[in-house]
Image (cartoon, rainbow, N blue to C red):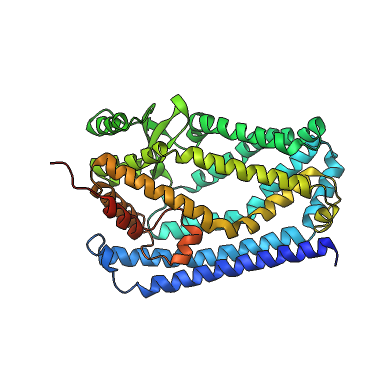
Amino acid sequence: METKTIFLFVCLLLIGAKWVVQFWLEQINRQYVNLHADMIPLPFRGMIDEPTYKKSVDYTLAKNRYNIVELTWDVLCLCVVLFSGVLPWLQGIWQAMCGTSVWANAGFLVVVTILLSLPGFPWEWYAQFRLEERFGFNTSTQKLWWMDRLKGIVLGVCIGYPLLVLLLKLVDWIGNAWWLWAWVCMVIFQLIMMVVAPVLILPLFNKFTPLPEGPLRERLLALARRTDFPTRDIQIMDGSKRSRHSNAFFTGLGKFRKIVLFDTLVEQLTPGELEAVLAHEIGHYKKRHIPKMIVVSALALLAGFYLISLLSQQEWFYHAFGFAPGVLATAFLLFGLLAGVFTFWFSPIAHRRSRKYEYQADAFAADAMNDAEPLVSALRKLNEKNLSNLTPHPFYSAFYYSHPTLHERETALRSVQRPPAI
């Protein structure tokens, strides 16, 4: 059996296996939620009333049905794109019009990436204006939603095209070691984006305003000083213009670091709960989770570039999908389409590390506040307001949850809680 045939069989097998496992995870999660649907589970009684709990169950089940249809659609689209010959056909048309230069090949990647995003638009639209609308979360307008997509495409072209040209040019400049220097360029690019994005890109989508002077601002800045967290500013983001979901994060590096609170979060939580949420975010910084994640991401990126460099030299890799061999841009495209099929199986490992970091940030917050209760109260409110699934199946959460469940976080927090100072 030819190598390309074996590779095609492995790809088909993994695509099918991924769909089967995802479908199974959705089914067992649905059954697990239904098992607890008739009565509020004991750990959550008192934090949520019956109508809200019933609504959270309905929201979870609605998303479950949506997820099954969407993931099936995604698999069908991927199979058509990979195995129908449409990509080699498009490449032939593109090369006839634009040639085979590095600039043309980079342009082909950008155009194909945009085209591949289009089949997902109807599902994203439905999720926003039907599913989220039904449960009272959507606050976006049609104009805003479409402008977001247009801005995303324009930014993708403006940033992605020059970057792709640079990566492809490295082959001409350096030769076989291109993958190592491509990795260096990408790491530098990502670090630059961490500084530039909060200043130049995020404001294109949301409005950021300084937290007004007053007791809340002083309380949060006092926490930052107490925990030795250098911050440039505390800002409010108008997340409410798209959704009633809430969040908080800090962004930027060095002197450009700033704390960002969704306006919905400020509305939903008390000052003490907001302080606890901020202490959690500071915990990520103090425990050096961001640098650790950057290192892991950089290593994965290095492995990815090395693997592309190997595959790009194999004729069977191109022939398996109907392409003529030797075009690095094609290897980039195929690798990008197939990467998720292989990395999906490592999701529980990545999420386990992420959940470990969340536990550490929670413990830091409890220590910084000298009391776990403000964070417990904040987490309970956020889960209630966001209609979060309070009873996910353990296998489902292992594959999809980057954060521990509410019950897991509460249990861990109370195990490290110490009596508040008198």
Task: Name which quarter of the figure residue 295 lies in.
Answer: top right
Q: Is residue 114 above or below residue 34?
A: above
**Eyeballing the image, is 161 above or below 397?**
above
Which residue is rendered at x = 75% and y = 39% of the image? 106
The image quadrant where one finds the C terminus is top left
- The picture places residue 117, in percent across and down from the top left corner, at 63, 51
On screen, residue 170 above or below 129: above
- Is residue 325 placed above or below 182 in the rendered structure? below
Q: Residue furthest left?
A: 422
Quadrant of residue 220 within the rendered picture: top left
Count of numbered badges drawn on the protein: 0
Q: What is the quadrant of residue 346 in the picture? A: bottom right
Q: Residue at x 39, y 26 (%)?
A: 232
Q: Nearer the viewer, residue 384 or 316?
A: 316
Q: Is any part of residue 147 visible from this angle? A: no
- Residue 211 in view in this figure: yes
What residue is shown at x 60% (from left), y 40% (from top)? 298
Residue 10's spot in the image, x, y percent? 73, 64
- Specify whether 300 is left or right of 225: right
Residue 376, x across and y down, in percent: 28, 51
Which image quadrant: the N terminus?
Answer: bottom right
How far from the left and from the top, in percent, is residue 227? 32, 33
137 and 4: which is toward the camera? 4
- Locate residue 363 relative to residue 357 in the image: left or right: left
